[in-house]
Structures are given as structure tokens and as C-alpha cells.
Image (tube, rainbow, N blue to C red):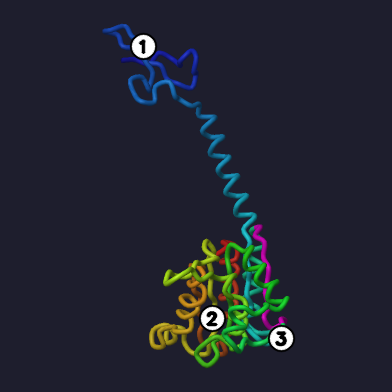
Amino acid sequence: MIKQGKDDAQPERQRYGCKPCQRQFGDLTGTIFAGHHQPQQDTQNSSNSLHLIAEEAMATKQIAIIQGHPDPAGNRFCHALADAYSKGAESSGYEVKVINIAKIEFPILRTQADFDHGQAPEAIKQSQQIIQSANHLVIIYPLWLGTMPAYLKAFFEQVFRPGFAATKNAGDRPWKQLLTGKTAHIVITMGMPAFAYRWYFMAHSLKSLERNILGFCGIKTTQETLIGMVEAVNNEKRQRWLDKMELSGRAGK
């Protein structure tokens, strides 16, 4: 068998010749792919198209940052973390919207009837719209008395109402999740060492948020960031955390 140049009709194919039988054949002759050879240029174009589609999808990804620190002054480390993440995400072309709960006025829910059937305040409706349109949530808050601040919990109770987060099916069937397909990155700052919170206290408030609030409505937590000893760390270490948050933002995680 010897090479005999390229195919006349499809020059991208190699042509071979067999001396004993005096026959010619190609590299796909006798296979299921015979007659279906695609030029390398077409394959490359298809690959380029897929890359363009992927890049376009990444560029249109929408991220909602829920700033859960209730201090309206806005000068806490949680705010710096949110700014760093937003900076990284916007540099990658993501659309970022921030919900700052300290800037939102809303009443605390006091009855089940209000939770099930009450009218959500306008500010809560706007937050629901941001969450609904987002592909990815970034939830940032400080650990207070072992859990999230009360105002953040009140915000979640207002936002994740029946009809927005989930709907109850007839009979004993499970609730229908209404926010499936979304992901979340939870960031918690705390005074204790992060390993003590995770392993001694079993990260109970984090797990409750993931399971009982986000998981209940179909949001999957894909990343956890626990920042311990936040009041004792020096500026150099704080900057390292900010750099990490910016990198997470760039990756849209």
C-alpha cells in the first residue's frame, strides 16, 4: 500500500493505492463513515461556533449579590467582600445586581396567614425580581450569636414566600420547587476560627440556610467561604480574602 496523493473530489482526504490489486481507496473506505467525511475547515468552524455560544452564555450570566450585613453605614468587611466579588464578576462580563438589605425597609412577618397569603412589600417584590432573573446568588453575612442576623432572616422570610419559592401540591405530595437551576455561593464572616464553626458547631446556620431555605426552593449551593477571626486578622490577610473573592467573581462562582 502506498500513498497516491489527495482525493480528486475531496482534497482534504488522503488517497492510497494497493499494488497487488491495483485498487485505490481512502482513509474511510469500508467504514461506517464512508461518504460522510467533513473537511477540517468545517470542523474548525463548528468548534468556533460552540466557543462563541459558550462565551455569549457566560457574558449574559446574571449574578445577584445579597448583602446580608444589616449595618446601613456600609463600611464592614462584608461590604468590602461584596465589592471585590462584584468587581471581578463585572470584569468578566457578568451582569451583577446587589440587594443591600440594610437599605430596604420591610416589616417582620408575624403570622402564618401573612406568610402564606399576605401582600409582599414593593421593595421585597423588587428583590424577588432580581433573584428570579439571576443564574447565581452570592449571599454574604456576618455570624451573629451563631447564626445569620435577624434582619437577614426576616428578609428571607419575606422573599421566599409560597408562590415565589415553592408551591404546595395537592394531598401529601412534596412542594414544587420554583427556583431550580440556580446556584449559590455563601460567604460568612465570624469572630471564631472557621474550623471551630465548621467542625465543632457543625456549621449549623450554614447548613440550615442551604437545606431549609435555598434547597427547599431548588437553589443548589456550589461554594462555601468561611472567614474566621475576622476582627483579629491583619490587613495583609484581609487583602488576600478580597483577592480570593475577586477571583471567584471573575469565575462567576
The residue tagged 3 is 72
**232 above or below 7?**
below
The residue tagged 2 is 188
Residue drawn at x 31%, y 15% is 1
Q: Nearer the viewer, residue 176 or 127?
A: 176
**213 above or below 95?**
below
Instruction: Say which label, 2 or 3, has the lower sequence index.
Output: 3
Q: Secondary structure at mark 3?
A: loop
Q: Residue furthest left?
A: 20
The residue tagged 1 is 24
**248 above or below 36?**
below
Residue drawn at x 36%, y 15% is 25
Amino acid type, mark 2: Ile
Amino acid type, mark 1: Gln
- Crowd around label 3: few <14 · some 14–19 · many ≥20 (10 Å): few
Instruction: Say which label, 3 or 1, has the lower sequence index.
Output: 1
Q: CA distance from mark 2 to mark 3?
A: 18 Å
- The answer to whether residue 46 is left or right of residue 97 is left
Q: Nearer the viewer, residue 58 or 101?
A: 101
Q: CA distance from mark 3 to mark 1?
A: 80 Å
Amino acid type, mark 3: Pro
Label 2 with label 3: CB-CB less than 8 Å: no
Which of the 4 image quarters holds residue 152?
A: bottom right
The stretch of residues the image draws in magenta is: 93-104
Instruction: Say which label, 2 or 1, has the lower sequence index.
Output: 1
Residue drawn at x 54%, y 81% is 188
**15 above or below 59?**
above
